[in-house]
Image (cartoon, grey):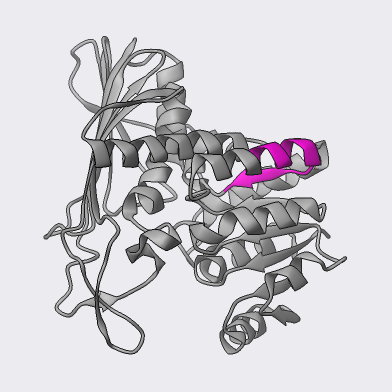
Amino acid sequence: MPGVGLIGLGFGAQVHLPAFQAEGWDVVAVCARNRDKARKVADAAGVTHVVTDARELIARGDIDAVAISTPPSTHHALAMAALAAGKHVLCEKPFAMTAREAAQMRDLAATSGRTAMVAHEFRYTPQRRYIKQLVADGQIGKFRICTIEMFMDRYVTAQPRLATWLAFHEHGGGILGALGSHYIDGLRDWFGEISSVHCQLATLRPDVVDADGKARQAEADDTFSLTLNFASGGMATMIASFAATPARGTRIAVMGDEGTLIAEQAGMNPTHDGVVVASRKGSPLARLATPEHLTLAADDRDHRLMAFRMLVRDFTKGIAQGISPAPNFVDGWRCQQVLDAARESAASGRTVEIA
């Protein structure tokens, strides 16, 4: 049974840990700054070893892989250290702080011979996989435009919300990276490389409090608008906000010269099931039956868990085969290029080309 060490116990405890265990991995050790929190998580999951120093975890000889689920500002150092130590790496998104960091991570992964993947697990959800298949099969003809609207009230609270890394630039905060990166990765998966970006960022609900109750102002975006052009033709727009009320979920429309696909979801993340509605050559919109080979069984512990388990399965296969399946560190670098260009566009007001 392969051994994995987990660094970061927020999303790591909710999804990484149960996913690796469910897929037959031995979670050897967990790492968090708060030892008491780490011990509680470890005890509940039957994990023996707890550390507060990531370097100690990475150095363990009984760990084959490291899963990183910490704020983005730490990803570069942790991934580089893990790869240098000969470990396979599964790194959370947003992948890095800059495309330069991402390129260094990509290059070391390539020369290390280790399997290195990025946690864009939503590629594995039935709705997203089915859209990719339908586009590839010519259901919509030539791709022209994709629109995505996501309006959530996550930051609309009676009292200022607790400050986390998401609120501050120095930690890689903002929903463009935290959530937009998932959608950018999905759009790349469907339509290919992105050639230019125009972006606007806003912070509509800046009031936060720190752990001591002191009032602060969030710096990072809680709202964004993106326009993306693709090298192969076609464009996509996305507008997203955590500061909208009432919440209205997410709607994706994919349009070509012969048809349209529509996918909706109640929240910001796709679920383990999902529905695609389609029209071809002017026919009425009708629900399509998701092919059985794309469906996922439910895991009631967390709606994101089955997709993440599929990612872990590919990670495991990649290690056995000596490859890094997509989404890998090349995909992480490509997505980071788009994020960098989006932030440059927001600061300058210009459309930014991507080499």
Classify 38 as above or below 108: below
In this image, 168 relative to 328: left or right? left
Quadrant assignment, res 352: top left
In this image, 6 relative to 234: left or right? right
In this image, 312 relative to 163: left or right? right
Magenta span contains residue 113: yes
Residue closest to the eye, 104 or 87 = 104
* Residue 116 pos. (x, y %): 68, 44
Task: Tell me, yes or no, if residue 328 can be seen here.
Answer: no
Q: At 33% across and 48% down in the image, what residue appears?
A: 176
* Residue 175 pos. (x, y %): 33, 53
What range of the chain is rendered magenta? 106-118
Classify 143 as above or below 208: above
Task: Tell me, yes or no, if residue 333 can be seen here.
Answer: yes
Classify 339 as above or below 235: below
Residue closest to the eye, 38 or 164 = 164
Q: Quadrant of the N terminus?
A: bottom right
Classify 264 as above or below 166: above
Quadrant assignment, res 140: top left
In this image, 99 relative to 339: left or right? right
